[in-house]
């Protein structure tokens, strides 16, 4: 059989030199995959098979799945609809007698359809398909990088207090680093099986090494139960095979189990990865496990090391503990060897080390001291540690030094077990992480500094800038004009498209709307529209259209020149006069030109010198492409899109969809497949106290629960004794207008002040919940005006700016028990989980919680809609295994588009008007949020202390008495809890998790009580 190189050489002898052989081969490979999956499929949609969608829905494990996964990596550039259209068109234009496939056009149901078939008269390399499939299956990506050899190099240092960049020179002796090398990738992982007796024995060993450790006592007192087809019974063995979902209520010992299991498996020389919520918890876990002799190391980002130092530094200590300092304060060898450094650049460069940015002749080199440099020790320790602890972002995005491999790739190849703590939150974080957004208006404001700097440069310095940098600055300089041109076009040309423009949209969406409006060549020929689109995508050239695209972004308002040029183009293309349709064409051209502008500025930024790159919201958005991750994960359900939203308050918001983020967790074993299509990734253990919330699109983890971890009976009883009180205020905070909201918040506080003062006389501090940091500050300030007898309130603060004694940093709230304040006011999304705010005995610092607002996120946020869409598809879109891969993929795309459109339409509806799926999601999401906040009170170590108290203060928890069909959250929660507990198949799971909360809630909150209020889905909230 021929090789791929033989085929390329043969084709070069016959095909014109204008044909790109690599693209020609990619086209044939993609079409060969379509032929294998669905010979009668539409070749224009063959790109759909390159998105790794076979991992979504019920996973199909066969040779075709492996082939599709490898093709997803190798042919990734053809997965783009636009790129595939170009590649396919060029392939069709090649000489057909040498093409593996020939095409015909047929009329089906009144539409022209493209068909393809094997060229049976092919004389050159007729066995290509077998060669293609063999190459796809065996292909491995090669990485090329160079270490700096002996000689003089330079590197840049950014002054963190200003935009100033300093340069330093260094002379490096010739040396070759001996970097650790990854062993060959592991094949299929064996299931992990450990008995409860073995875990207790390991916990006992830990107690011997550290007598004050509590793992043994907690593990011994709690109960592991196995779930089989809805039946629950005690288990004496934990078996983790591929994906294992273990749930347990607060205080059941999930974190304890994670620690003991890590210790136990480390003794057996297994490789375990722990994924935790915050960097501080990562470092604390490393410090904890190291006390027992475990070989453990963190994987965290370098750029935030100064912030991490502040988080782990203990009060009144001069030095960091060694477990932290060896990773956070280690010096850079190159920086110590540097010459001609200025005074300001002489401080340690934590996170700014030139590991990959040593410059010589305008080329970057890797540091030759990576193998011994203490500053990057954590990235070397990955290869030798038994336990590696990281965050969600660290797992998804960090690259290891040396071969520049993603840490994620290393985990997929080498880890035996990955444990996700708080897996429901991980799921949401992953979905949002791969759907970044940014404000273009903020970007144009921040661009002013760099533009001003360049304008003030001496001519000699200005001329020394390279062409790419000049182009980037030129693009920045017109950002104000571009921004205003787009905003004005939306307002001026939107007309009957206002509904579309009030949602997320893209040039593709506007073009499809144009085609729909022009059905039957109503205004202009479809051919003219198609040509216009091809020009805007760079597939055709047309001076008239290109001139129009230049003009639309150069004018903030329509000029006479633009109007004349546009009218001439309409006349040349016989467009019938219609103002709305003409305006819509203009708007499409504006958005398409803006797309190109963003693409160009993104490409320019990517190749900027290091010293010119700035940490801004949009520049991070532009430079973060997740290319390597996209080759591993399934694509976003609607494709990897670029779009925008015109927010009246925030301006132009840009967003991208890169990948189906949650698959990194709940499909991890299948992110690497064997040749036979079997999972070759690590086993996964998912832990959570609220991941079983059926109907919740964001937090419900669509993996069957296999194990339950049950807390001691006395703790469950104590939690069931909690007081749940509806304060019955008719004052509505949530859903009120922004002008009224602050006033209503203070009115609620004033009305319930007697209850607050009574609580202050009880044991434990008070937690008060609002929806934003600004609301937290408003509430705390007002409370401090009303409080007496030395009592005071503090609000959670995100940053240290404008910090005063009545604020507590988010990073310090775990120590609130020792704070002088008696009340903490915090945003719901910032306090919901991840923090054990306890006293010195491990008992919750809080005795009660007041919900001053209905804790909801803004439902129209792009990231929120993306994670809800992913949850919907996993739960509702049944992808039948009987259908071929092409039909599965097409159905997924179609269902994703339909559901996205539905969510867009319902984004501003009243809660009572939502369809049943979205209404259930709102209720279930609120339940999870309330439950997690309630969990801050449920760290119980002293049975003699009072049970927690929960107060619902916002009138928006109830519906209007006059609107009996309205949304009443407390009633909905009762019905939701009833349905979960009463479910014959999964009721035992819900009972183990939620029975104590359920009992307390039903005792304290009566059904069918109403306040005279209206309802609304909105509650303002800042991002976290």
Image: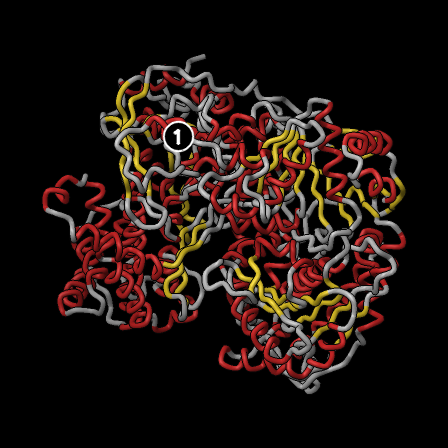
Q: Is residue 536 left or right of residue 377?
A: left
Quadrant occupied by the N terminus: top left
Residue 910, picture quadrant: bottom right
Q: Is residue 291 left or right of residue 763?
A: left
Image x and y of residue 127, in percent: 44, 18
> Which of the pair 64/968 is nearer the observer?
968
Colour setting: secondary structure
Image x and y of residue 725, in percent: 77, 74
Q: Is residue 167 left or right of residue 879?
A: left
Residue at the image point whose x is 63% and y is 49% from the top: 874
470 to 239, vertically: above or below: below
Residue at the image point whose x is 86% and y is 43% from the top: 223
SS state under label 1 = loop
> Which of the pair 506/261 is nearer the observer?
261
The residue carrying mark 1 is 355
- Crowd around label 1: few <14 · some 14–19 · many ≥20 (10 Å): many
Is residue 168 in sight in this rendering?
yes
Image x and y of residue 32, in percent: 46, 29
Image x and y of residue 91, in percent: 33, 33
> Which of the pair 341/163 is nearer the observer?
341
């Amino acid at each position: 059989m021929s090789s791929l190189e033989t085929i390329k050489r043969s084709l070069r002898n016959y095909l014109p030199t204008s044909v790109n052989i690599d693209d020609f081969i990619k086209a044939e490979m993609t079409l060969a995959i379509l032929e294998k999956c669905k010979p009668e499929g539409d070749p224009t949609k063959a790109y759909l098979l390159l998105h790794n969608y076979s991992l979504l829905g019920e996973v199909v494990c066969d040779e075709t799945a492996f082939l599709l996964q490898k093709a997803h990596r190798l042919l990734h550039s053809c997965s783009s609809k636009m790129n595939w259209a170009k590649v396919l068109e060029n392939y069709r234009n090649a000489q057909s007698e040498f093409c593996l496939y020939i095409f015909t056009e047929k009329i089906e149901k009144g539409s022209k359809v493209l068909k393809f078939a094997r060229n049976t008269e092919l004389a050159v390399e007729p066995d290509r398909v077998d060669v293609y499939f063999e190459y796809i299956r065996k292909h491995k990506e090669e990485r090329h990088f160079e270490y700096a050899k002996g000689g003089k190099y330079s590197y840049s240092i950014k002054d963190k207090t200003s935009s100033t960049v300093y340069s330093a020179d260094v002379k490096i002796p010739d040396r070759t680093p001996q970097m650790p090398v990854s062993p060959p990738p592991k094949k299929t992982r064996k299931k992990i099986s450990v008995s409860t007796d073995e875990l207790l024995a390991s916990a006992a060993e830990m107690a011997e090494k550290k007598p004050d450790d509590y793992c043994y006592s907690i593990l011994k007192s709690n109960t592991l139960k196995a779930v089989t087809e809805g039946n629950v019974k005690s288990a004496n063995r934990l078996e983790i095979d591929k994906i294992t979902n273990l749930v347990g209520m607060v205080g059941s010992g999930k974190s304890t189990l994670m620690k003991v299991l890590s210790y136990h498996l480390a003794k057996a020389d297994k490789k375990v990865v722990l994924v935790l919520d915050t960097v501080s918890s990562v470092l604390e876990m490393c410090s904890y496990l190291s006390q027992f002799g475990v070989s453990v190391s963190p994987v965290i980002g370098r750029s935030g090391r100064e912030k991490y130092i502040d988080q782990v530094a203990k009060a009144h200590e001069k030095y960091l503990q060694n477990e932290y300092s060896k990773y956070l304060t280690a010096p850079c060898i190159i920086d110590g060897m540097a010459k001609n450094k200025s005074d300001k650049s002489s401080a340690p460069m934590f996170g700014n080390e030139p590991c990959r940015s040593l410059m010589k002749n305008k080329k970057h080199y890797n540091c030759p001291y990576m193998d011994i440099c203490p500053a990057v020790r954590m990235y070397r320790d990955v290869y030798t540690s038994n336990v590696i602890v990281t965050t969600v972002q660290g797992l998804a995005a960090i690259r290891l030094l040396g071969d520049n491999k993603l840490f994620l790739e290393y985990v997929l190849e080498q880890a035996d077990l990955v444990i996700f703590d708080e897996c429901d939150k991980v799921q949401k974080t992953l979905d949002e992480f791969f759907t970044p957004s940014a404000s273009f208006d903020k970007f144009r404001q921040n661009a002013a500094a760099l533009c001003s700097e360049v304008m003030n440069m001496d001519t000699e310095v200005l001329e020394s800038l390279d062409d790419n940098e000049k182009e980037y600055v030129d693009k920045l300089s017109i950002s104000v004009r571009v921004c205003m041109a787009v905003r004005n076009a939306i307002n001026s040309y939107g007309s009957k498209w206002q509904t579309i423009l009030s949602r997320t949209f893209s040039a593709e969406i506007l073009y499809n709307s144009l085609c729909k409006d022009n059905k039957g060549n109503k205004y202009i020929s479809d051919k003219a529209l198609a040509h216009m689109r091809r020009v805007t995508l760079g597939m055709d050239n047309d001076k008239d259209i290109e001139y129009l695209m230049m003009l639309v972004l150069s004018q903030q308002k329509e000029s006479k020149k633009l109007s004349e040029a546009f009218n001439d183009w309409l006349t040349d293309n016989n467009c019938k006069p219609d103002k709305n349709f003409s305006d819509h064409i203009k708007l499409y051209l504006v958005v398409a030109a803006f797309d190109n502008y963003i693409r160009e500025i993104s490409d320019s930024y990517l190749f900027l010198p290091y010293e010119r790159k700035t940490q801004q919201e949009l520049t991070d958005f532009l430079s973060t492409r997740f290319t390597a991750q996209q080759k591993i994960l399934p694509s976003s359900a609607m494709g990897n899109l670029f779009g925008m939203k015109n927010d009246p308050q925030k301006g132009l918001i840009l967003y991208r969809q890169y990948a189906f983020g949650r698959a990194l967790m709940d499909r991890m074993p299948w992110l690497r497949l064997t040749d036979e299509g079997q999972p070759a990734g690590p086993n996964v253990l998912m832990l959570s106290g609220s991941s079983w919330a059926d109907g919740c699109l964001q937090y419900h983890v669509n993996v069957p629960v296999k194990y339950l971890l049950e807390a001691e009976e006395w703790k469950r009883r104590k939690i069931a004794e909690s007081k749940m009180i509806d304060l019955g205020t008719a004052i509505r905070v949530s859903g009120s207008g922004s002008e009224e909201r602050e006033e209503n918040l203070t009115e609620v506080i004033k009305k319930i002040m007697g209850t607050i003062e009574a609580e202050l006389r009880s044991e434990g501090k008070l937690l008060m919940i609002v929806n934003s940091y600004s609301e937290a500050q408003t509430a705390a300030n007002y409370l401090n005006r009303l409080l007496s007898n030395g009592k005071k309130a503090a609000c959670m603060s995100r940053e240290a700016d404008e910090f005063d004694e009545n604020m507590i940093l988010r990073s310090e709230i775990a120590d609130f028990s020792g704070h002088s304040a008696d009340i903490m006011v915090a945003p719901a999304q910032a306090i919901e989980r991840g923090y054990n705010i306890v006293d010195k005995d491990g008992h919750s610092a809080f005795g009660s919680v007041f919900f001053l607002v209905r804790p909801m996120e803004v439902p129209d946020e792009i990231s929120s809609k993306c994670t809800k869409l992913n949850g919907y598809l996993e739960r509702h879109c049944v992808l039948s295994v009987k259908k071929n891969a092409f039909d599965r993929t097409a159905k997924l795309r179609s269902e994703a588009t339909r559901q996205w459109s539905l969510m867009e339409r319902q984004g501003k509806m009243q809660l009572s008007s939502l369809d049943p799926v979205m209404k259930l999601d709102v209720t279930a999401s609120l339940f999870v949020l309330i439950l997690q906040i309630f969990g801050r009170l449920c760290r119980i170590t002293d049975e003699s202390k009072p049970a927690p108290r929960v107060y619902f203060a916002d009138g928006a928890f109830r519906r209007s008495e006059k609107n009996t069909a309205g949304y009443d959250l407390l009633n909905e929660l009762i019905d939701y809890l009833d349905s979960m507990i009463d479910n014959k198949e999964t009721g035992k799971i819900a009972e183990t998790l939620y029975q104590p909360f359920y009992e307390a809630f039903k005792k304290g909150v009566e059904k069918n009580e109403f306040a005279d209020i209206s309802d609304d889905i909105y509650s303002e909230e800042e991002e976290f």
